[in-house]
Amino acid sequence: MSVDMSKHFSTSALIRFTLPTIAMMIFTSCYTIVDGFFVSNYAGKTALAAVNLIFPAVMILASVGMMIGTGGSALVAKTLGEGDRPRARRHFSLLIIFAFVVGSVLSLGGWFFMEPTATMLGATPGSQMHHDAALYGRMMMISLPFFILQYAFQSFFVTAGKPKYGFLVIVAAGVANILLDFLFVGVFGWRLPGAALATNIGELIGGGIPLVYFARKRSTHLYFVRPHLRWPVIGKACANGSSEMVTNIAMSLVGILYNWQLLRFIGEDGVAAYGVIMYTVMIFSAVFMGYSVGTSPLMSFQYGAQNHTEMRSLLWKSLGIIGVASIVMFLLGQWLAAPLSAIFVSYDAALLELTVSAYKLYALCFLFMGFAMYASAFFTALNNGLVSALISFLRTLVFQVAAVIVLPMLFGIDGIWLSVTVGDGLTCLVAATFMIALSGRYGYRKGGLSPKAKAKAENGD
């Protein structure tokens, strides 16, 4: 059954509503995590370092799906809140077609430029690491259009009121990836190409099944119709979701910078340790991202319906949930640092010790990460892509980049591991300032809209 987004959500109902989206994000992260496990244990740390080196470049291209999904779903949800379902369906259909076309173009370009990309990222031409990085990256281009669709559909399933269906699709894709990794890498011994092929098939499932689902009329209030080519709609969705794209691109760029610094300070072992940390951190960040994406359509719907009381209720409940989750995540990070690291690199005692030590420092970022992510998604939900993008831009391309460059000069290797914490902490201060300053404009503060905003709304501005 579809979920009625116009109803009042208690805290427990809000958590239940977002759980499928959180699970979707976790299972999406499983692609990389499972690949990392099998690559590390069956192909060795050089192959693991190669995957970690090239993966940020792949994610930069895949971030288009996140942009179209989050920005487009906010636009579609707002249109649904205004009561215009036929127009919402046209917007939805247009944006999915656009995502697939852009994904195909990026896939072709990525295939031809993968070797110079591996060189640019720090791999020495002719080395085994360079060969493995280029090979894995090229194979990721095969299924890139469907990976982009998978990201987009994660948001649209929530907007359609079918988060559980989205969850089931990602479970199917994730389980297929895990089983095929075991078969191709563990049984057949195909090493790195086997891991990449398993991911290809998982992404085809994750992006392909929703195409069939939404092609059926009356499967939900959203389904494919003949779209009208409206560049302003595409532009609005892309601008509105640009913050999520900026976040993913910037996170990838920060990852590239991390790898560069680690190669300089430690060498190949540093890149491998960072990869292990990122594999497990993906699960923690997926919880925050899943909650942010899961609640965004609710906020967009209430914003379109001008229900300011429910907007305020959603905001305060979300802040409380994220606050509790942040503390729990930090404690789990400290407690699980050793066993999680051992899953990937137990075969190398020195590398394991380095990874555990680094993990405990890196886990401090869980105290700030959730609020930073939610604030950006919150303004995307309000169709304010500018503020959302600014928060994301400052978080990654300014604060984190500056931290990863400056802190190692002050604290050595420990400064690298603390960079994300410093960046997210500064982002929280900026985000809180925006949320307070714009509360009267959008009406989520007590008392609703400010007089100026109310006058604009009455005049239709």
Image (cartoon, rainbow, N blue to C red):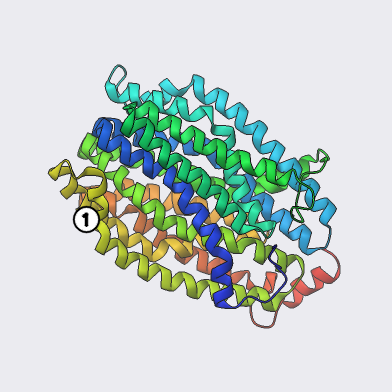
Which one is nearer the viewer's eye here, 169 or 414? Answer: 169
Single out the residue that lies furthest toward the left. Answer: 349
Give residue 178's quadrant in the image.
top left
Quadrant (top left, top right, bottom left, bottom right) of the C terminus = bottom right
Image quarter of the N terminus: bottom right
Residue 308 in view (yes/no): yes
Quadrant of the image occupied by residue 35: top left
Q: Is residue 147 visible?
A: no
Q: Position of residue 20 (x, y in %)?
A: 55, 59
Crowd class of label 1 (few under 14; some 14 to 19; many from 20; radius 10 Å)? some
Q: Residue at x 52, y 46 (%)?
A: 172
Q: Residue at x 66, y 45 (%)?
A: 238
Q: Nearer the viewer, residue 68 or 414?
A: 68
Residue 132, image x, y percentages:
34, 25
- Front-most of residues 297 and 222: 222
Nearest the eye: 148 or 204? 204
Residue 357 position, x and y percent, is 20, 54
Total marks placed: 1
Q: Residue at x 71, y 42 (%)?
A: 95
Q: Residue furthest bottom?
A: 447
Residue at mark 1:
338
- Where residue 396 appears, as percent x and y from the top left, is 45, 50
The answer to whether 165 appears left or right of 252 in the picture is: right
Q: Label 1: state its secondary structure.
A: helix
Dot 1 amino acid type: Ala
Q: Is residue 256 above or below residue 4?
A: above
| 360 on left or right of 291 | left
